Amino acid sequence: MNKPERPSWDEYFIEMTNLVKQRSTCLRRQVGAVIVKDHHILATGYNGVPSGIAHCAQTGCLREKLNVPSGERHEICRGLHAEQNAIIQAAYHGISIKGSVIYTNTKPCSICAKMICNAGIEKVIYETGYSDPLADEMLYEKKVLLVKYEKGKF
């Protein structure tokens, strides 16, 4: 009997980001993140409002109302990004993520890149691109590996 082919570790964790993103409460884009060390999941996060705060489905999206393009005016959004929520969850539960890898289905923005740099995350593996040259520059300068996941190439 032939065993089905197992997914690579990268495929496994990228697929998990796509499951995690299903919990997102954002009306514009669903993003999931999984922080991993030594093939063990340390924390997950999805984009959405802080715990205990009304969801955008209830309040509406101010960025949408104001026609703010993607990647701009993050400060008026009620939500946190998936990477931010994953980092916060690790901190909340006292889990060190130094030396870890973060998987995300969307490439991090510059705000998340800053947090990734200071959290000690060493590698970012993402599935879909997101144009933010400052994020790329900071991750490069900090020597955080930034890798675009391509199925079958890992």
Image (cartoon, grey):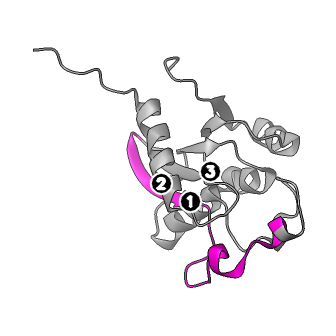
Task: Find residue 46 and name its label.
Answer: 1
Residue at mark 1 to residue at mark 2: CA–CA distance? 6 Å
* Residue 19 magenta-highlighted: no
Residue at mark 3 to residue at mark 2: CA–CA distance? 22 Å
Label 3 secondary element? loop
Label 3 environment density (alpha carbons within 10 Å; few <14, some 14–19, many ≥20): some
* Comes first in the chain, label 1 or label 2: 2
Q: Amino acid at mark 2?
A: Val
- 70 is higher (above) or lower (below) than 141: below
Quick check: 113 left or right of 43?
Answer: right
Residue closest to the far left = 1
Find residue 133 and report its image quarter. top right
Find residue 67 and report its image quarter. bottom right
Q: Whole-percent x and y of residue 110?
A: 80, 51
Residue shown at the point (62%, 37%) measured from the top left: 126
Label 2 secondary element? helix
Label 1 environment density (alpha carbons within 10 Å; few <14, some 14–19, many ≥20): many
**Circle 2 is placed at which residue position?**
20
- 18 is higher (above) or lower (below) than 90: above
Front residue (pair 15, 8): 15
Q: Amino acid at mark 1?
A: Tyr
* Residue 40 magenta-highlighted: yes
Q: Bounds of the magenta span?
A: 38-64
- 100 is higher (above) or lower (below) than 52: above
* Comes first in the chain, label 3 or label 2: 2
Quick check: 5 left or right of 13?
Answer: left
Q: Whole-percent x and y of residue 51?
A: 55, 79
